[in-house]
Image (cartoon, helix red, strand yellow):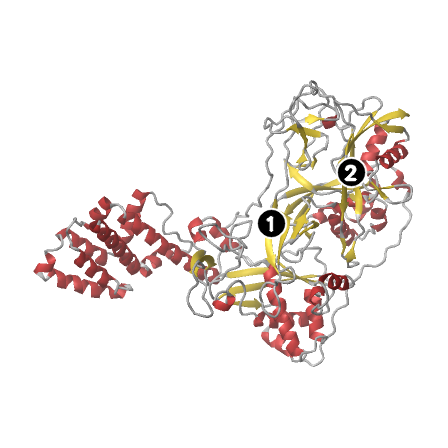
Amino acid sequence: MRWKPLIFGRNTIVETLEIRFLSDWHIGEGSGQPGHIDKLVRRHPQDGLPYVPAKTITGIWRDACEQVAAGLDFGNANGPWQAWVTVLFGNQPTQIGRPEQPKKEYREMLSDISPQSACLTIRAARFPNSLRQQLAGCPPLKESLTFIKPGIRIDPKTGQAIDGHLHFDEIVRAGAILESPIYIEGTFTQTQQQVAYALLWAGAKAVARLGGKRRRGLGRCQFKFNAISKEDALNILKQNDVPTCPEPSLDKVHQFTSHDSASQTDDWVQVPLHLTLKTPVIVPQGEAGNLVKSLDYIPGTHLLGAVTKLLRQSTKVDLFSYVAKGDIQVSHAYQEVSNTRGLPVPKALFYEKYDNSGQVYNRLMKIQGYAEKAAQLKQHREGYIITFDKPIGEKQHLQGLFTTPLQLTTHSTIEDNSGRPAQERDGVFIFEAIKTGTRLQSVLKMRKFIADKLKAANENWWEVLNANIRVGKSKKDDYGWVSLKAEHCQQTPTLPTQSPDKQLTVWLCTDLLLRDARLRPSTDLADLQKELEKQLGVELRTRKENDDTLSALIRTNRTEGWHQRWGQPRPSYIGLVAGSCIVFECQSGRLEPKQLQALMRRGLGERRAEGFGEVRFNPPLLMQALSELPRLEANNFLLTIKQRRKTELAMTSDSQAFVKILETAAWREDIRRAAVAISVNTKIRRQTFDWRADKPPNNQLGALRTVLNQMQTLGDKPYVLGWLDHLCGTANRKDKWTDKGLKIVYAFLKEPQLIWDELQKSTHQSGLKHLFPTLRTEAKASLEKELWAEAVRTLFAVAIRYEKRERDF
């Protein structure tokens, strides 16, 4: 199948890798179910089906390509084929040499090595879309994808099982065929593209196993990369002169140019951007041990490059100077609630400790009866809210306090030599990420004259922003895939403000970056006051606080980053954190509404193009006490990606073969469940077979079970019928059965449909549902014929076991 290009598309080659499992397999989640399963299979968050993570594919495929390259280069670590491996998969600074010096000195050595970006992007291998659609509508077959396998641990000295080491693992059935989209980015000539294909083809052929317990029979597989034929790949690999690798494409150095005169106007337009996370997204915030923590939003820094690149490629308009001077801005992508962009909860909002009534108090305003309150108030420090736009005095409600859903995923670093998780160098690590399916919203803002230039080049220029982009950490494998959807370009709306005389309430909606007189990063309120005085042309001072009201509720933040083009860390950003609230009093001058609106549109402080410095002045939310406004129940807000099931896609022959395996497994499980449902009830069991408390005796039941065990297929039926005929011809044996009981046994053997009717009828009485599912056309008839003998054997064996057990007790 053809996949939609992931990003930008101009120099992106899109292909498909097919993984065919020849044995049962296990890709672990890193956790289990206490008391039931020790190791769970990793399942995709969208559909709950097993899959192969992109990190697993990348690691195993890279190792295979390195082995192929080592052979073609005759062991030369700096050979031309090894260089191609580095171009496709990137380099691994941590794998350069084996450090004998202390860990700290080794890391200092690695800090001088810039990582080389990979040209190859690999996404997770999942079942084909057609099969996913079919399984989504059939939960019993979805459950039959896996089974529980017991295992033990053997003492290497005695060869015996070790006590206390019995474990149960979840295993995926053999026969699965998964597809992984891959993207090759870069400027390749036709010859270079064929060389890359040949190396990837050879590496795919070298892969034999993947996943857990792959040395003990699990995970046997075949990688199929059909972008190049076998003959063409072998001809390229036999060449003595290997084509050189493509040079890294570097963007040209941009020169600052003077702004147009129109840039001095305050006419702004905006394009709301809706982001849907197709995979988890990691925006690194810091590390805590082996945990990589993530922000719960996507900063504009991560979106600005992708957005401007899409616009530049479509319109050919150079936007660099406008970005550098803040005339183009991409705001932080916060959680979207009811199609509205949420904003960080103001630090001025408090709630009563141990109180679940939902009342919210604004500490910037005087609260009636606050001095008499004995309850302790706590500050809201996390989450997002939807601000209201109604004037003071109208009844309104806070639109809940929402938190962005995060997830934790365990990964491991595999040693090249042992093929096992590394123990000495951070072998196991955990990524925190924003969950798949979360919807965020950002805003692209620019001055109107820039939008006019884009419109001259492309009438509907905003439509080019409807694309898939990559953001964050590990964005070339399991993370960072974001679907971007843009609305129409529109005039920037006038933000609601209340204008009390001589008072200015400031709410920071993103982090604010300022500098002091010596150009050092500053978090001092005095520097914020000076910046506001400069922009508004007034004289301000911080409002005096008293027991009833507060005037400044701020926190500071330090943001780290990574510059991909430099291959080095960004300078740290130190500023006031989003949600901070400050109240100033105007000492001289007048707070003009037009000036406030203009400053809110263009932002405050540094790096406004990346979303920093977004502010609100005198918002209605913070201009009232809120003591009588109940807060709605706070829930995590997560929109799952809806499956596109408008049309049923036809399954391939390979998928149908795997579905047959699932159907057979599901039917066998249903046969066992139905047999137990019939046999566990004494009344139903004896009514079904016409058995009595003493008739037939146990020895006759045992003989019948032994004979039925010889019937493996429908063709073995005459052997059992012959045994029954001989029994009926022997008087002293026939008398041990009832006439009806013998007729029932004959009926089960001579009427193939009777066993299925009996299983269905009796299980309905027991409350079992959705038995014997099928997806394939005419699968029911073939499965009934194939599993007829097993169904008869199972039903009689289970019934005889329950009958003997009841008689013994």
Q: Amino acid at mark 1?
A: Leu
462 sits left or right of 34 in the view: right
Dot 1: what SS? strand
x, y percent for residue 577: 76, 39
Task: Say which mark, if any, is on residue 352.
Answer: none
Q: Residue at x 71, y 26 (%)?
A: 362
Q: Dot 1, how many residues are within 10 Å of its Cα: few (below 14), some (14-19), or many (20+)?
A: some
Q: Based on the displayed image, in which of its 4 quarters is residue 110 positioned? A: bottom right
Task: Say which mark, if any, is on residue 408.
Answer: 1
Q: Residue at x 18, y 50 (%)?
A: 691
Q: Which residue corresponds to mark 2? A: 614
N-terminal-most mark, 1 or 2 = 1
> Front-most of 155 and 49?
155
Q: Based on the displayed image, in which of its 4 quarters is residue 794 positioned? A: bottom left
Q: Amino acid at mark 2?
A: Glu
x, y percent for residue 77: 70, 75
Q: Residue at x 48, y 65 (%)?
A: 218
659 sits left or right of 443 in the view: left
For the N terminus, the image quarter is bottom right
